[in-house]
Every structure is written in structure tokens, then in C-alpha cells.
Amino acid sequence: MLVDDHPVVRAGLRAILDSFGDIAVVAEGADGAAAVDADATTVDVIVMDIQMAGMDGITATKALVAASGPPVLILTTYDSEADIVESLSAGARGYLLKDAPETDLHRAVMSTARGDPTFSPEVGAALARRVGHPDLALSRRETEILRALATGASNREVASSLFISPATVKTHLIHIYRKLGVDNRTAAVTEAQVRKLI
């Protein structure tokens, strides 16, 4: 099953996957809710984007895992460490970027259908960095704060949007600066973008 909110992307993926001969696209959906409602008796694997109008791919993946649904291969343009880790924590069996070669897509779909984990090289490298330096990995809340800072939000605005106090934001910033080896907000956002943490 293909799940992506762009019809043109779905059409292109369908053409590629159908051309392999040993893969058949049996269903499509425009958001995660369609994946959650998929008939598990006819769908062996769900190839799904993360960011979509309606239910996002991570929320849908969690629901599918909870319901013992088909395994999920995330296929997206989002290559930040935060998106990768969140998707895999939700239960996705694979994570591939949309610019991957067709042969990698074929391998990833087949591996995911078998329940085997599969990742693009970029994803593997991000996971290796995180495992190699767990003390320097950003928490989900720290990532949310950095994403908000990247929009130019003040500490007070960040606190309001995340329903936490400005003092809590400051505490998180101290930890973020230490983990990224920087000493100010601008440098933190820049470094996080360079490392593809946000």
C-alpha cells in the first residue's frame, strides 16, 4: 500500500513498484488514517511518508504497530535525525529517502515485507552517530525547542507553544548548548541544521 498526500508522487511510485514484477500495489491512501484502515489480509507492507495532511505517518505507524498491522517502510524527503529516530521509535521497520535508487526501493520494500529492518545509508549513519554518542543525542523536547527557535521564536513564545515555562526552556537550552558544543541560540540552530538534527 502506498500512502502519500501527493497524487503525483503516488502515481510515480506505483509505476516504479509495479514495474518490478514481484511487487503489486494493491491500495493507496492520502494520509495515515487510510493506512490504519487498510485491510491487513491484502496488504503485506505499507510504504508511507511522514508529513501529510490529516494523520501523519508517525502517528499512523504507532497505531499500526499497536494493532499488529502490516510493517511500515517510511519513504520521505525528511532526513533529520529527529524524524528518523521518532519514526523508528514508533515502530517503522524501514526508513528510506525518496531520492534513493529504484533498486534500493525494491530491496527496502521486500525487506520490510519480511519484517527485516532496512535503512538508506544516510539513515544508517545518523543512527550510528546517535548510538556512538548517546550522551550527546537530543531529546524529543530539545528537538522541539530547536525547531521552534529556528522559526525565530523567543523563549517566551517557545514556552507558550510547548506549554512549558520560560525557565524550563532556558534549562533545555543549557543542555542543548552543551550537547551541540555551542554557546548561543543562533549557533545551536545552525549546528543542528548542519547535523540534520532538525
Image (cartoon, rainbow, N blue to C red):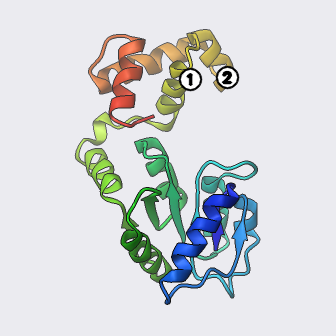
As drawn, is 60 to the left or to the right of 171?
right
Q: Where is residue 24 in the image (x, y as percent from the top left)?
A: 59, 85
Q: Where is residue 165 in the image (x, y as percent from the top left)?
A: 62, 15
Q: In this view, does 68 lie above or below 36?
A: below
**Disc 2 and disc 1 in contact, CB within 8 angstroms:** yes
| Residue 148 circle label | 1
Residue at the spot x=58%, y=66% of the render?
Answer: 12
Kind of residue at badge 1: Ala
Residue at position x 45%, y 65% in the image: 94
Q: Which of marks 2 and 1 is nearer the N terminus?
A: 1
Classify 10 Å Cα crowding around label 2: few (below 14), some (14-19), many (20 and above): few
Front one among 189 and 103: 103
Q: Nearer the viewer, mark 2 or mark 1?
A: 1
Which residue is painted at 73% across and 81% down in the image? 39
152 over 74 or under it: above or below: above
State the residue position of label 2.
161
Secondary structure beneath dot 1 equals helix
Residue ID at (63%, 21%): 164
